[in-house]
């Protein structure tokens, strides 16, 4: 099933989070017949988001987790804590984690493994910088991120991949449908090369997805959804993006 996910990043408060989730929950029932809808609030707003969602139609995920199960890691949260809070998903390897916190592929793979062990589904993020794209290295960089960030023996029904070119995140510069098509076809081949079972894994595009560009991106053969940052903070925009998704 195609996935439309909202990454709230370090935004919102209890009142705005509750209002947004209530509006989404009231509207998404018909959409969830053909879409998985997920929001990734900041950790302290997970409880608020879950309490504001009367049905389980809207899944909630954490934006990160530690690779250890517990212990002396001040400021971090574990995958089991996310499960305990009611999360079904966790994002790992977002480019802002890779750049702000120096997360390597090995760390991302360890986090994904911890998340799987705790019972979460993982959305693993990859994407090249502008310099890497301009020097013609985007395909190689992203393939290396995928191969390095996926834990061994990762079941195909427990993860999604999100391709987010760093230069398109929060910049308003969306990748062209041609570039997204090329990269997603490449990523499909990389996934299948790793494991033939990955033929049906959703590969989401992320990077300045908005209501006016969503339909063109979501119609592409190997685009299995969208990971939306800025536009996921407004119910109207997030719903418009979900409504732009094809029904099959
Ligand atoms: C993101 O945070 O994953 C993202 C894609 O952000 P934006 O949609 O704001 O570019």
Image (cartoon, rainbow, N blue to C red):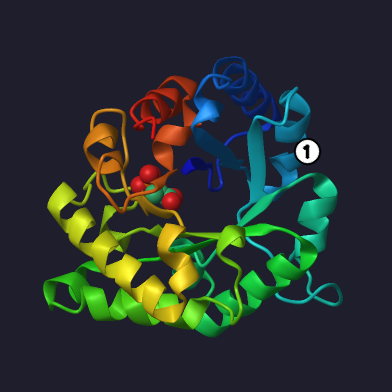
Front-lying residue, 34 or 138 = 34
Kindly indicate the quadrant of the structure image that contains residue 143: bottom left
Mark 1 surroundings within 10 Å by alpha-carbon count, few (fewer than 14), some (14 through 19), many (20 or more): some
Q: Secondary structure at mark 1?
A: helix
Kindly indicate the quadrant of the structure image that contains residue 70: bottom right
Expressed as whole percent of the image width and height from the top left, the position of residue 124 reads 51, 64
Q: Residue at x 70, y 75 (%)?
A: 67
Expressed as whole percent of the image width and height from the top left, the position of residue 145 reads 40, 77
Q: Is residue 16 above or below residue 82?
A: above
Is 57 positioned to the left or the right of 197 in the image? right
Front-lying residue, 57 or 91 = 57
From the image, tell me which residue sits under label 1.
47
Quadrant location of the C terminus in the rendered image: top left
Q: Residue at x 23, y 47 (%)?
A: 174
Expressed as whole percent of the image width and height from the top left, the position of residue 168 reads 27, 53
Q: Is residue 3 above or below residue 158?
A: above
Q: Residue at x 42, y 29 (%)?
A: 242
Is 238 positioned to the left or the right of 22 in the image? left
Is 213 positioned to the left or the right of 238 in the image? left
Q: Is residue 13 above or below residue 159?
A: above
Answer whether residue 136 is visible to the viewer in this image.
yes
Front-lying residue, 161 or 65 = 161
Front-lying residue, 84 or 129 = 84
Q: Is residue 37 above or below residue 139?
A: above
Answer yes or no: disc 1 within 8 Å of ligand 1. no
Is 217 positioned to the left or the right of 235 in the image? left
Expressed as whole percent of the image width and height from the top left, the position of residue 191 reads 40, 72
Answer whether residue 176 is visible to the viewer in this image.
no
């Amino acid at each position: 099933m195609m996935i439309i996910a909202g990454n709230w990043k370090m935004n919102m408060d209890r009142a705005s989070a509750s209002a947004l989730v209530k509006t989404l929950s009231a509207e998404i029932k018909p959409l969830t017949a053909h879409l998985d809808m997920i929001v990734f609030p900041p950790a302290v707003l997970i409880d608020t988001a879950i309490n504001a969602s009367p049905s389980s139609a809207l899944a909630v995920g954490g934006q990160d987790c530690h690779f250890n199960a517990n212990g002396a890691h001040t400021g971090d949260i574990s995958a089991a804590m996310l499960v305990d809070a009611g999360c079904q998903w966790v994002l790992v390897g977002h480019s802002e984690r890779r750049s702000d916190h120096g997360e390597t592929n090995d760390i991302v793979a360890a986090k994904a493994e911890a998340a799987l062990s705790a019972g979460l589904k993982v959305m693993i993020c990859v994407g090249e910088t502008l310099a890497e794209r301009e020097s013609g290295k985007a395909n190689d960089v992203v393939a290396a991120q995928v191969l390095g960030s996926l834990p061994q023996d990762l079941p195909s029904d427990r993860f999604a991949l999100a391709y987010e070119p760093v230069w398109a995140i929060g910049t308003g510069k969306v990748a062209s449908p041609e570039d997204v098509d090329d990269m997603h076809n490449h990523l499909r081949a990389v996934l299948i090369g790793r494991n033939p079972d990955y033929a049906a894994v959703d590969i989401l595009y992320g990077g300045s997805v908005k209501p006016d560009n969503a339909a063109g991106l979501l119609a592409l053969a190997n685009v299995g959804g969208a990971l939306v940052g800025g536009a996921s903070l407004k119910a109207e925009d997030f719903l418009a993006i979900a409504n732009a998704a094809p029904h099959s």
